[in-house]
Image: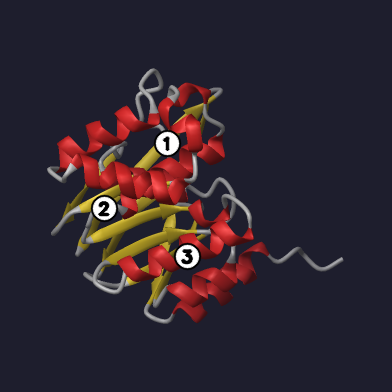
Amino acid sequence: MIQLDNLCKTYVLNGKKKVVADNITATFPTGVSVGLLGRNGAGKSSLLRMIAGTMDPTSGTIRSTGTISWPVGFGGSFHPDLTGLQNTRFVARIYGVDSDDLIEAVMAFAELGQHFKLPVRSYSSGMRSRLAFGISMGISFDTYLVDEVTSVGDAAFKARSEEVFLERIRSSGAIVVSHALPLIQRICEHGAVLENGQLTYYTDVKEAVRHHQDIVKPPPK
């Protein structure tokens, strides 16, 4: 379970305030996959980072039971001067998993080739995402946070990413950010829509998708 209590997050950009979380109170149940939807810039990635603990809210609290992954697809937690292999080994030690097993799994999945032994600062954003996804899927979490990672790579890689992810969430929950609505409906049970700092939670993902489509629909001419 992940419980948001009166969660607020405000940015100040060029002297103007932008509110991405306005006193949100919501519960993400244990073992459920939730599609997190909203316009570009609504604050979905910020919400994932606050849940992961990599970003502090302006106010309010987040309580959770079980283990939570970092936001998969967000490679900002990697040390840029370490190689992909060294970063993988470092993460394995932090989470107490066998480093050789994790390295083998990441090498097989991420398809980075010789880049795996090069500094992460030399990676493209797609390569960082593949590394992050490979490491995350190699470690068992109670809740996975996923930010658009299945959009990376060719069709075969996308299909393999989805297959691995579906295997993981058979015994875990997830909060998934994606603009691919067919994907959200395929892999998620519940849905939530973030709009103007407010979060609306639905126990039927199709209702969340309809809400999202309504708010992004262009105005009539």
Label located before the other in sequence (1 or 3): 1
- Residue that appears at 52% across and 29% down: 123
Q: Are marks 1 and 2 in contact (CB under 8 Å)?
A: no
Q: Is residue 18 visible?
A: no
**Residue 99 x, y percent position in the rendering:** 21, 40
Residue 6's label in the rendered image is 2
The amino acid pointed to by label 3 is Glu
**Residue 11 x, y percent position in the rendering:** 44, 33
Label located before the other in sequence (3 or 2): 2
The amino acid pointed to by label 1 is Gly
Left or right: residue 219 compared with residue 195 = right
Q: Is residue 15 above or below residue 217?
A: above
Left or right: residue 15 compared with residue 59 = right
**Residue 187 x, y percent position in the rendering:** 44, 73
- Residue that appears at 40% across and 64% down: 164
The amino acid pointed to by label 2 is Asn
Q: Is residue 42 visible?
A: yes
Label located before the other in sequence (1 or 2): 2
Q: Are marks 1 and 3 in contact (CB under 8 Å)?
A: no
Between label 1 and label 2, give the one nearer the viewer: 1
Residue that numbered label 3 is attached to = 162
The residues bearing labels 1 and 3 have C-alpha atoms spaced at a distance of 19 Å
The residues bearing labels 3 and 2 have C-alpha atoms spaced at a distance of 33 Å
Residue 75's label in the rendered image is 1
Q: Residues within 10 Å of mark 2 (few under 14, many from 20)?
A: some
Report helix, strand or loop for mark 3.
helix
Q: Nearer the viewer, residue 127 or 62?
A: 127
